[in-house]
Image: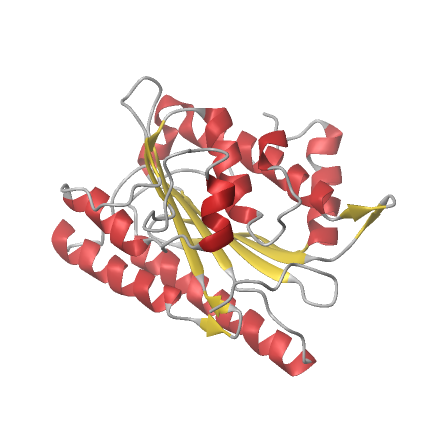
Amino acid sequence: MAYDIKWGSSHPGHLVYLIDLSGSMRLHNKIDDVIDVMESVSEFLVGMCEEFREIRNRFSLTILGYNTNVIELFKGSVIELDSLLEKTVGQGKRLFDKEKEVQPTSMTHTASAFKAAERDIRHWIDVQTKAGKPMPAPIVIHITDGHPEEMHKEDSVAIAEALNAANSLKAISVPDGNTLLFNIHIVGKNAGSPLRFPSTSPVSPNEKFLYDASSVMTGAFVDRARKLIPSVNTSSRFVVYDETEKNMLARLIAFGSSVSVPSADFNDVIN
């Protein structure tokens, strides 16, 4: 698995963002921070595809929010993403309305979110296959403040179901490589010390779940990740626990989103 097909107009990549919209995301301005970060990262991604003042369709993007339901917040090409930014952020509005589109409520049905991402990626693969286009490995970035839950089920069962769904998602393969899954756990301000890109599994059940559910870094990913975290090695996982810094969250998402665009500098993301 080479992971060496770079995003391009003739072989566009595909990104899926999964955003936790459970009730706890209202606390400590977490949903506001995530919306702000999504705006900054979206602008970064569009800029990454701009050439001679023209936007090139180098990737497609699906943004899904989830609690007990999965909600499609955006689905389209980079040109359509640019249009959305012009209609919202460009007009002084927010990318998503937290009282309507991204209203945090209810529980964290993580397994359902991973299954929705799998359906989305399989559809993308079918479309690209019929078009005869080479495919960079798809990328999924999951942002959550909690642990997997399922209505009327013990947490241990919900975690097991979510891990099965994550492993099924990571098993989706194209010739360039398996789907990459990056999990980011966020917390409120001053709530602890973040652990970024660990290479050994933590002990607590939720942290172990996120570690096991995340892809292993290899090759060029490790080299790029060291621009953020010097201690990254070839056993490190695409996982972050207890992230508290909004600007770092933006850089982490930009890093994960641009692994197929080596020239992109994710440190340029501004909140």
Number of disc labels: 0
Q: Is residue 79 left or right of residue 188?
A: right
- Position in image of residue 53 (x %, y %): 86, 43
Residue 62: in sight, yes or no?
A: yes
Residue 98 seen by the camera: no
Q: Is residue 105 left or right of residue 268?
A: left
**Is 141 placed left or right of 165 in the picture?**
right
Q: Which residue is depicted at the point 57% across and 70% down? A: 124
Q: Quadrant of residue 243?
A: top left
Residue lying at 32% horizontally and 60% vertically, measured from the top left: 166
Q: Quadrant of residue 144?
A: top left
Judge from the rendering whether residue 271 lies leftward or rightward of residue 25; answer left or right.
Answer: right
- The correct choice, above or below, for 238 with respect to 126 in the image is above
Q: What percent of the width, then of the height, locates residue 50?
A: 78, 46
Q: How is the image coloured?
A: secondary structure
Indicate whether 60 appears above or below 271: below
Residue 6 screen position, x and y as percent: 64, 59
Foreground residue among 237 and 243: 237
User: Which residue is most to the top?
Assistant: 190
Query: Does 214 sit above or below residue 120?
Result: above
The foreground one among 178 and 109 is 178
Quarter of the image with the C terminus in it: top right
Indicate the position of residue 62 as horizontal and vertical percent values. 56, 55
